Amino acid sequence: MLISCIKAEQLKLKRSFIWIAFFLLPVIPAFMGVNNYLNNIEVLTSDWYSLWTQETLFYSNFFFGPMIAIYSAYLWRVENFQHNRNALMTAPVPVFCVFLGKLISAFCVTVLTQIWVGLLFIITGKLAGLEGLPDAVIFMWLFRGLLGGLAVTALQCVLSMVIRSFALPVGLAAIASIVGLLASNTSLGCFYPYSLMIFGMNANRSDDMLGSSVVLFIISSLIYTFLFSVLGIQILKKTDVKA
């Protein structure tokens, strides 16, 4: 049944407008970052690592969270219109399959987004004249960012389910990402969901900002994902919340 729910959500994504956001939004931080790099190339002397610091400065802090919010809000968009939620809840489908189907579908688009961000990083690096390819650790940071992204996807799915608006959950994600940037500079960063993406991506750093806190980062990401998923399933099971 879960597989059927995922397939149903994927049908919604076909020919949807979110692919415009998917392709265009990551281009903005990529070119802002490479422009910063080229304008400060005298002091940014670590080649691919320096370019990474500049591109993730914009992407991880200001774009990653809102993009996840767009994916999540779109998948709840149909159910949030008129009486479609009632039709959904009377269908012979377990509630956990409904929620997880949307969560997994939104996360799949997030995975594709990280792949696209990685490709843009290589493209802009080549345009900037960097030799060879980035070190493997940078691709590991991209993958690690998905763990933080998974927790935020679960949270945004809950917000988009509860708040019957497309724009508001995206706006909340933008604000929460800025707070995440501030929190990432404190000892409590690993306990704030929107900071997890920044830590995972090693945003604006060339040395690993997690250091010995990798295990704490992984545990925090998985616990938040579990808690938000359980919360979303329970809310969907017990009540039909209106904004």
Image: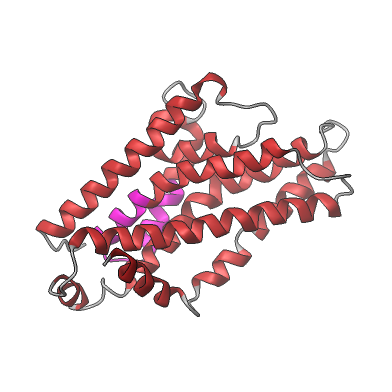
Towards the viewer: 37 or 98: 98
For the N terminus, the image quarter is bottom left
Position of residue 33 relative to residue 25, above or below, is: above
What residue sits 35% from the left and 50% below the top? 154
Q: Position of residue 243 (x, y in %)?
A: 21, 62
Looking at the image, residue 65 sits to the left or right of residue 172; the answer is right
Q: Position of residue 232 (x, y in %)?
A: 23, 52
Q: Quadrant of residue 95?
A: bottom left
Position of residue 53 relative to residue 239, above or below, is: above
What residue sits 55% from the left and 26% below the top? 210
Q: Quadrant of residue 75?
A: bottom left
Magenta residues, as a range?
Answer: 154-175
Looking at the image, residue 6 sits to the left or right of residue 212; the answer is left
Magenta segment includes 161: yes
What residue sits 86% from the left and 45% below the top? 132
Towards the viewer: 190 or 167: 190
Towards the viewer: 243 or 138: 138
What residue sits 46% from the left and 47% below the top? 149
Position of residue 237 relative to residue 40, above or below, is: below
Q: Position of residue 146 (x, y in %)?
A: 50, 46
Looking at the image, residue 120 sits to the left or right of residue 110; the answer is right
